[in-house]
Every structure is written in C-alpha cells, then in structure tokens.
C-alpha cells in the first residue's frame, strides 16, 4: 500500500516540536516508548464490548488478558478493590459515573470552573451542567484555597446528590475527610476526580481519597504518564444507594452500576490497544524509577514556584503542594492569552488559564497555568528550573520586543538538546 507521506510528515514535525521545546502544560507528559509501542499494535483491530470473561464478541481471549492485567495493576497501585480501565478519557469517566449514579435533573456540587474546576464538574456548556442541576463552591479571595466552611453551607442549601472534588488548576492538596463529612451531612455521594495528581497519590506523596470518597476518577496520561485515557476506581465496593435491583431481586453493587455506566451506558467498544498501554504504564508506576520521578516532580514544582515568587510573580494560594501552579499575571500587565502566545513563539508551551475572581473572559484570562510533569520526564531537576523561569520572565517583562522570542527560542532549542526525547525514534 502507498505510504501516507502527509500524515507521517506531520507526526515527524510534532516529534520535533516536542523535542525542541520546553513543555509546561500541567496536564501533559511524555509516555515511555513501550507505552507508545503498545498503543500502535494489532489490539486496535479487536472489538471487545463487555468486560474480561463476559464479552459480546468472540475472540476476546487474548485482549481479556491485557485488560485484566490493567485492572489488576490499577488495583495494586492504589490498593483498591475496583477499577474500570475502559473510559476513553477523564471526561468519559466522569460521564459514566454520573450516568450510573444520578438521574437527569439531580443536583451536583463541584468546584467552579473559573476557580480551577473542570468542565465535567457541572459547567453550563458541558453535559454535566445540562443534564444535572449544578451548584459550585470556590476558593477564598484572600488565600486562594478551598473554602470548606462555605462548601458545607452550599451543600446544606442545595442538597446535592453528588459532591465532586478535584480540579484542573488548583495547586493545593484536598481534605477528603472533611468533604466526606460535609457529604454525610446532606446524604450525598463524593466523587474525587484525581486526574491531575493521580501519579503523586499513587506513590503516597499526596492525600489519598480512597478511604473517604465513594468513587474516584482519573486520567491516565498526566502525572501517571500513561496513554491518553481515563479510569474509574473505588476503594471498596458497596451496595448501591439507589436501591436498584438485579432481575433476581438482589441489590446491585456499585461496581456493577459503574461498569454499566461505562458500557453500555456511555461507550461502545473499548480501545484495547490503549488499555494494553495503560497496563504497561501501570507496570512502570509500580517501579522505583517512577517513585523517584514523582519525588522529582514535587521538588521541581517547589523550585519553580519559589523562582517565580522571587521574581515578583503572584502565585494563586502562594505556592503549590502538587505538580502545578497558577500564576496571576495582573501585576505584570499582560493577559494570559498574550503571555501564552509570546512563550509559544519561544518554544515554551503553557496554557492561559482563568484565575479566581478573574475580570477577563476565558479566552483571554489573567493567568497562566504551569506544570512540571513533562519537563521532569525530560530529566530536569531543580538545577534547570531557574533558567526556565528566567526565560519566561524575560519574555513577559518585554512583550513588545519582537526579536526576543526568536532569540530565546534559539537558546531553548539548544538547551533541550541535552535532554533527549525518544532518541530511539529517527
Ligand atoms: N483536564 C484538563 C487539563 O487540565 O488540561 C483538560 O480537560
């Protein structure tokens, strides 16, 4: 068959972009070569609706093994009873959980998107805000941290069926025990979305939600450093609180509800090539190397936040407990959008992000979000971080200097040659 030069040229260019630049998008990482290899395999050819040992298609005896390995390893990593590794993404995992545990019109309570929350936690433009009735908690204007007292007040007033904790742009750890106590007051379920810090929780470096939250969702490609995808976990299975029964009159367990929330509820055939790659990445998470990686992520985030603070930047909440930080640029007189554009010209990739109580719209924003998982995979330690912050500061402090981004880009590209990415790929 004729080779598609067009698409493979584009892929080659993307490899070059990733190699030459400094990747600071907090939700991105570089999966290992063996994770990439598993994704590009014949497993993509297989239909396997259902679950290992109970499929709707013949010939699933082999993919059953890789999916079961992924499930077993996920359970081992987090020391949990239940894992569903089929969600195609974090958003799909959240959709499946909501479909399984809520009725349309039920009330949900999540962190406001403009305060660091996620679209699937009740945003008006997302299914979660269209099918369910959302209300939101937020962070304090003074401290930038979650206002648990107010969360309790809102929960008492709104009586949500589900409280969702977890965020996309929040740099502090969560008090899961306190959230569970609030949920118990109003008889709500707690879902923790740990998409961002999952890899750090996996290695015991941040609070674990499993003892307190009924259900936990995550992505697999951020700090877990696996293939792009999602997953649903439960510390312990339990009888579902909806009183739903099987045709035989037995109460359906939560695991059974969640499994049907994924398939047939919101997805069809699972991506068995991606599930095999999830299994490979979970194997990696269990190694000492990954533990060192996670520790270095934490150290790099601390170094990064200190370096920004030293240069007069305002970090929301004053610092970080995890792998990311949100920088409020209002004292620097530049929008998040403009900063993102400037930095991209110099091959430094970040994303513009709303900051709490932002006066600019989501497409402009007053802030940028910065994360260190990807540069840590490239081999950065605390030694390289000040140089990165210096470049960012140089660019942000002189935004009208048209020559500067190109000068910095040259330096960045040269610098990155010492941190090879996928050297095995030509
Ligand atoms: N989870 C989002 C992010 O943090 O980038 C994307 O949905």
Image (tube, rainbow, N blue to C red):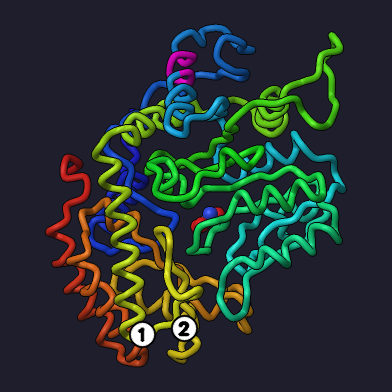
Q: Is residue 46 left or right of residue 95?
A: left
Q: Is residue 109 left or right of residue 327?
A: right
Q: Which residue position is annotated with label 1?
A: 396
Graded by Cα atoms within 10 Å as few (under 14), some (14 to 19) or many (20 or more), the crowding at tag 2 reads many
- Labelled pair 1, 2 in contact (Cβ < 8 Å): yes
Q: Secondary structure at mark 1?
A: helix
On-image quarter of the C terminus: top left
Name the spot of residue 284 as percent of width and height, x first.
31, 34
Q: Is mark 1 within 8 Å of ligand 1?
A: no
Q: Secondary structure at mark 2?
A: helix
What residue is shown at x 59% (from left), y 81% (from top)? 142
Count of picture labels? 2
User: Dividing the picture into quarters, in which one does residue 299 lie?
Assistant: bottom left
- Location of residue 106 with respect to 355 vertically, above or below: above
- Location of residue 187 with respect to 233 vertically, above or below: below
Is residue 395 visible to us here?
yes
What residue is shown at x 43% (from left), y 68% (from top)? 325
State the extent of the magenta-drawn residues as a range.
63-68
Name the spot of residue 66 as percent of width and height, x first.
43, 19
In this view, the residue in front, 337 or 191, is: 191
Q: Residues under labels 1 and 2: Cα distance?
A: 9 Å
What residue is shown at x 39% (from left), y 62% (from top)? 371
What residue is shown at x 31% (from left), y 83% (from top)? 310
Graded by Cα atoms within 10 Å as few (under 14), some (14 to 19) or many (20 or more), the crowding at tag 1 reads many
Q: Which residue position is annotated with label 2?
A: 329
Q: Is residue 64 magenta?
A: yes
On-image quarter of the N terminus: top left
């Amino acid at each position: 068959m004729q080779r598609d030069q067009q698409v493979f040229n584009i892929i080659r260019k993307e490899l070059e972009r990733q190699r030459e630049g400094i990747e600071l998008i907090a939700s991105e990482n570089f999966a290992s070569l063996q994770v990439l290899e598993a994704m590009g395999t014949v497993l993509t050819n297989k239909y396997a609706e259902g679950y290992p040992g109970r499929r709707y298609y013949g010939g699933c005896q082999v993919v059953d093994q890789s999916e079961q390995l992924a499930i077993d390893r996920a359970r081992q990593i987090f020391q949990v009873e239940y894992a569903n590794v089929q969600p195609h993404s974090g958003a799909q995992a959240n959709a499946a959980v909501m479909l399984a545990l809520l009725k349309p019109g039920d009330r949900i309570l999540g962190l406001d998107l403009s305060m660091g929350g996620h679209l699937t936690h009740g945003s008006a433009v997302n299914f979660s805000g269209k099918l369910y009735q959302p209300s939101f908690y937020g962070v304090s204007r003074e401290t930038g941290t979650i206002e648990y007292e107010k969360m309790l007040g809102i929960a008492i007033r709104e009586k949500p069926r589900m409280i969702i904790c977890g965020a996309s742009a929040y740099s502090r750890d969560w008090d899961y025990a306190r959230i569970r106590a609030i949920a118990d007051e109003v008889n709500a379920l707690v879902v923790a979305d740990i998409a961002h810090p999952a890899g750090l929780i996996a290695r015991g470096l941040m609070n674990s939600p499993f003892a307190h939250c009924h259900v936990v969702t995550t992505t697999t490609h951020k700090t877990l450093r696996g293939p792009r995808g999602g997953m649903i976990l439960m510390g312990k299975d339990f009888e579902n609180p909806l009183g739903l029964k099987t045709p035989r009159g037995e109460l359906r367990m939560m695991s059974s509800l969640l499994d049907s929330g994924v398939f047939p509820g919101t997805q069809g055939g699972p991506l068995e090539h991606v599930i095999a790659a999830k299994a490979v990445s979970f194997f990696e998470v269990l190694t000492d190397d990954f533990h060192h990686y996670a520790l270095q992520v934490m150290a790099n985030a601390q170094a990064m936040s200190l370096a920004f603070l030293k240069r007069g930047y305002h970090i929301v909440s004053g610092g970080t407990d995890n792998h990311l930080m949100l920088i409020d640029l209002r004292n620097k007189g530049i929008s998040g959008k403009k900063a993102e554009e400037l930095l991209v010209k110099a091959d430094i990739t970040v994303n513009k992000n709303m900051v709490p109580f932002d006066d600019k719209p989501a497409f402009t924003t007053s802030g940028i979000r910065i994360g260190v998982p990807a540069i840590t995979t490239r081999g950065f330690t605390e030694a390289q971080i000040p140089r990165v912050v210096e470049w960012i500061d140089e660019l942000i402090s002189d935004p009208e200097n048209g020559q500067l981004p190109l000068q910095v880009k040259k330096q960045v590209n040269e610098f990155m040659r010492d941190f090879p990415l996928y050297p095995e790929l030509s």
